[in-house]
Image: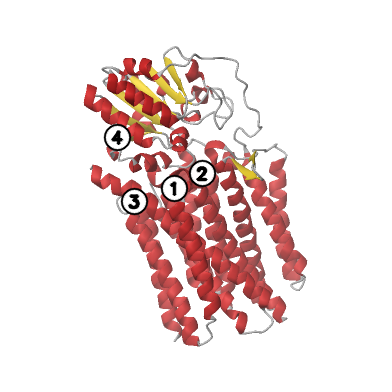
Amino acid sequence: MTPEFLIGNMTLFILAIFLGFELITKVPATLHTPLMSGANAISGISIIGALIGSNVVYDNGNTELSGLLAFVAVVLAMINVVGGFAVTNRMLNMIAGKKRRGA
Amino acid sequence: MEEWISIGYLLSAALFIFGLKKLGHPKTAPFGNQLGALGMLVAVLTTVISMQVQGNANWELIIAGLVVGSLIGYWLAVRVEMTGMPELVAMFNGFGGAASALVALSEVQKYMDGGDIPTGLKLTVTMVAAGLSALVGWMTLTGSLLAMYKLKGGIEIFGKWIRTPTWGPTWLNPVKVLLFLSVLVMIYLSIEEPTNETYLWGIIGVSCLLGLVLVLPIGGADMPVVVSLLNSLSGIAAAFTGFIIGNSVLIIAGSLVGASGLILTFIMCKAMNRTLLDVLFKSFGGNGEKQTLTRTKVGSDADEVAMMLDGAQKVIIVPGYGMAVSQCQHQVKEFADLMKEKFDTEIKYAIHPVAGRMPGHMNVLLAEANVPYEQLIEMDEINGEFPDCDVALVIGANDTTNPAARTGEGPLAGMPIINADAARTVVIIKRSLSVGYAGVDNDLFYMDKTMMLFGDGKVMMSGLNTAVKEI
């Protein structure tokens, strides 16, 4: 790992944090729960790391524990991702769908 | 070859940013959610295809994991009742945090098993990021699971219902700080002595404990704030994991969720007139003492209430958790339609920002019953209207209408409330006079102009509807 690579990652980290602060400004109370739930589904992005990790198991014969941990991570992250987006969708359909009809 | 992987991740990061932005506005929120899901799909496909191209994909395991996880997640999301949604969000959140921490652990374990401990900068970055990811991730898991059971109210063990405790003496606060510092120390030690696994497991153990200790003292209306904070933390955990495996999309998506989740947490705190520090360190009704009831009130019946409703010009409905529990939103809607039809009554709904167990809980339930969105008025806007409303109909709400919040003392101090007590007549549907989540007796119940309908929300609303029809 070169210092340049680390600096590049730090740059992404800091800029994304600033962006995150700016993205959410005024949110009506109705949307607090769906927004939380949707953001939560996005935090399941560690699925990428889990996939890469669980794939390494065959590369190197003696990494069973490491691969197993990553496999559990794939399952948990996938529950978070699929469940999170699905439940958010259900909530939003109830709020937004009905609103359009009512207006 | 490597370039298109980066471009795939870049595309997915952009989709996450647009998705989050759109999720914050009522009209575009469903689209925003779909953009987020699409971003995730792009990220997963990019990863899987790159494995295939590199020719070392371990398909059985990958597909098994993806399918099992998806099925469980989808099944949970579709099956859940509207009342159970907050708990489910808390649980998903815990799983996300755990997944990030597991990936971090798996990476470190890989180095240890392989015997090739990195050196220099790589060692420091790996250990610091793995330690922080473990701290935040495991804390999110235990904290979220405890939050889930607190939202449920208890846990059933061998058919016995055990209430989830809320317990937080003041000496617990320095303990929280100490646990946090000890994790930082262990991270430092793990860099000094990278082959020693003890520190690794030590960090995990202490982090799990920290999550429990952090959530244990929190109750009542503060619960959603904590879930939101844990959501923010699970994002941060993903970002730290991104540092370990050197993956840009993890860093971007993780820190986006971390930052926007924190802002959302502050917005929620503001809606309740509390600061985040108060929420975390001043326990809410947490001394476990519930006020004992010394007063009584004679209950009314549906016919009596219906007579009083005869000819009402304006009725404001104040829904609370009781409506969610009894699932009586359809009866409430029917009542509103009846009143409109018979007496041309103006009906509005007063929505407290934390009514129920999650912000927006009431909106979701009422929307399900086809209540027009324009009739749902947020607390600040409707509070001025109570003095000229004939009847305030409170359905299963307690703490959010408790005038004790105005006195500036006790667990409810400072929480903004719905001014239901300013209405000419107050009708309250509630199972008993018992105290609410915060454990404070409610003066509103004992006022002369208050009529109590004791019973389950659905039964009482149906009875009331029948009585109104017969006038």
> Where in the figure is residue B413, as x and y percent of width and height?
54, 28
Q: Which disc number belongs to residue B224?
A: 2
Mark 2 surroundings: few (<14), some (14-19) or many (≥20) residues within 10 A: many
- Label 2 amino acid? Pro
CA gap, disc 3 and disc 2: 21 Å
> Where in the figure is residue B371, as x and y percent of width and height?
30, 38
Residue indicated by mark 4: B375
User: Same subunit under labels 2 and 1?
Assistant: no
- Label 1 amino acid? Thr
Residue drawn at the location 54% of the way across and 78% of the way down: B60
User: Same subunit under labels 3 and 2?
Assistant: no
Mark 1 surroundings: few (<14), some (14-19) or many (≥20) residues within 10 A: many
User: For residue B233, what is the image quadrant?
Assistant: bottom right
Residue B437 in sight in this render: yes
B309 shown above or below B6: above
Left or right of B143 on screen, residue A43? left
Residue indicated by mark 3: A93
Instruction: Provide the secondary structure element on which disc 2 rests.
Output: helix
Dot 1: chain letter: A
Instruction: Provide the secondary structure element on which disc 4 rests.
Output: helix
CA gap, disc 4 and disc 1: 20 Å
- Label 4 amino acid? Gln
Instruction: Provide the secondary structure element on which disc 3 rests.
Output: helix
Residue drawn at the location 57% of the way across and 74% of the way down: B245
Disc on the earlier residue, 2 or 4: 2
Q: Which disc number belongs to residue A33?
A: 1
User: Which one is nearer the viewer's eye here, B356 or B195?
Assistant: B356
Quadrant in the picture for the N terminus of chain A: bottom right
Dot 2: chain letter: B
Disc 2 to disc 4: CB gap under 8 Å = no
